Image (tube, helix red, strand yellow):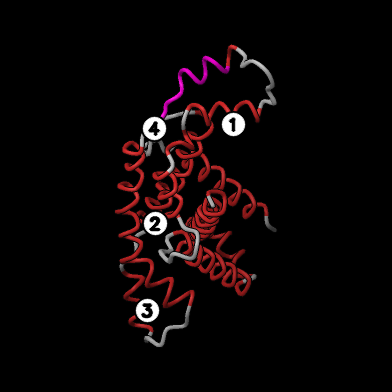
Amino acid sequence: MFELIRGDVDTAIKSNFTYLTIHRLAAENADIFDKYNRFAEFWMLNAYSLQTAFFVTFGRIFDMRRDVYSVHKVVEDTVANPSLFSKSALRDRKRKASRISGVDPEWLVEYIDNAWEPTRADLETLRVELAPHYAKFKTIYQPIRHQVFAHKSIQDEKAIFALFEKTLISDVQEILRFLHTLFWAIWEMSWNGKRPDLADFRSFDGEVKRLTNKTEQFIRGLP
């Protein structure tokens, strides 16, 4: 479940920032704008595909139905199972990953001694921190996902435009940044015994920089 939803978060980040990079380059560079216009239908389809991938995946991440995987279930299971992040469980994972048999080596003993071990109360912070991001998604982005991309609404263009008027690029980036950092924190807690730091955005910033640089490099290299 963790890997499935982390994969959806990765897809949402890639589709969102690729879309933004493509449009930013067109606004900044007349040659790239002309390059797009030479194959306008392709780039229009590309833009629609990226938008669709983003909103459908965004909705799947926050889906509250009981019969599907979602970020809510990942957090619920994390909070409900602090033993998964105990020193004993960490030791077992490290022994298996390092193919250790017999007595623990000195480095592992020291590593486990210095690891952080959470209580259920410690993990409740994850649920609390998720709540405002879900509330923003539900209010602003879920209606767009349902009425524009997942289904064909009978509302007129004015009503659809009104939905998009409520969106902010910064809002989306803030939610994606939190989601990426949440999954990174759970992984670090599981594999390295580290206390979750949901204000450490270095992994997210590095991934966005890598993605936007690669996209820009590709587009600039097109004939």
- Which residue has dot 2 on it? 172
**Which stretch appears magenta?**
108-117
Q: Secondary structure at mark 3?
A: helix
Q: Residue at x 35, y 39 (%)?
A: 120
Q: Residue at x 47, y 44 (%)?
A: 183
Q: Is residue 33 above or below residue 191?
A: below
State which tag comes first along the sequence, 2 or 3.
3
Characterize the local packing of mark 3: few (<14), some (14-19) or many (20 or more) Cα atoms within 10 angstroms. Answer: some
- Which residue has dot 1 on it? 93
Characterize the local packing of mark 4: few (<14), some (14-19) or many (20 or more) Cα atoms within 10 angstroms. Answer: many
Q: Is residue 181 above or below residue 131?
A: above
Characterize the local packing of mark 2: few (<14), some (14-19) or many (20 or more) Cα atoms within 10 angstroms. Answer: some
**Which label number is shown at residue 160?**
3
Kindly identify the amino acid type of the residue bearing the numbered disc 4: Pro
> Is 168 left or right of 214, judged from the image as shown?
left
State which tag comes first along the sequence, 3 or 1.
1
For the C terminus, the image quarter is bottom right
**Which label number is shown at residue 118?**
4
